[in-house]
Amino acid sequence: MARPLKFKTPKELKDAIEEYFDYCDNRLVQGYDNKTNEQFAYISPEPYTMSGLAYSIGLSRQGVLEYKRKDGFSDTIKRARERVEADVERRMNDKRTFTAGLIFNAINNFGWKQKSETDITSGGEKLDSLVVIKDGSKTI
């Protein structure tokens, strides 16, 4: 028997997701000024993550993805994933926030591919001859 849904309506889920994004955008961090011996708080946005989203709304990462397969909830999850992916991409393009972990995240969570092309035949030099193999016969 399947357990009941945590979120009964797409709006409930959307509201919980928006709370997560609002928290990330407005996260308060405590600081300390050594000169004045005073504590202070400042806004330091937290990066969006699928794990953070799932934890914030009380689900596992897999639980979030399962909502994507439920009627009426798919668009809400798809939009949230796109927002997290856009944040990951933005941080990859900012030299102050770039880490190799962002590439790992994009590849493993959002289906990105890391591709490189290597010329292993000529080392970039002009070819003097070309070998073409057709149906087992060799043409030079």
Image (tube, helix red, strand yellow):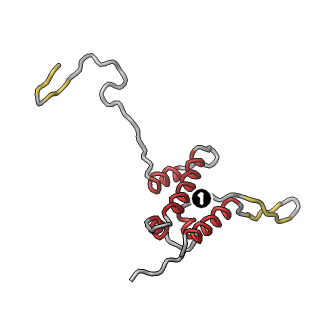
* Location of residue 122 in the rendering, given as x and y in whole percent from the top left corner: 32, 24
Q: Residue at x 29, y 19 (%)?
A: 127
How many marks on residues? 1
Q: Nearer the viewer, residue 23 or 70?
A: 70
Q: Residue at x 52, y 62 (%)?
A: 77
Q: Is residue 132 left or right of residue 36?
A: left
Q: Residue at x 20, y 23 (%)?
A: 131
Mark 1, residue position? 48
* Location of residue 82 in the rendering, given as x and y in whole percent from the top left corner: 53, 54
Image quarter hosting the N terminus: bottom left
* Location of residue 62 in the rendering, given as x and y in whole percent from the top left corner: 45, 68
Q: Nearer the viewer, residue 97 or 74?
A: 74
The extreme top residue here reads: 128
Q: Nearer the viewer, residue 14 or 56?
A: 14
**Mark 1: amino acid:** Tyr
Picture quarter containing residue 45?
Answer: bottom right
The extreme front residue here reads: 72
Q: Is 62 drawn above or below residue 49 in the view shown?
A: below
Q: Nearer the viewer, residue 81 or 138?
A: 81
Q: Is 107 drawn above or below residue 63 in the view shown?
A: above
Q: Residue at x 41, y 41 (%)?
A: 115
The extreme bottom residue here reads: 1
| Neighbour tally class for label 1: few under 14, some 14-19, many 20 plus, Cα within 10 Å | many
The extreme right residue here reads: 36
Image quarter hosting the C terminus: top left
Q: Secondary structure at mark 1?
A: loop
Q: Is residue 67 left or right of residue 135?
A: right
* Location of residue 87 in the rendering, given as x and y in whole percent from the top left corner: 59, 52
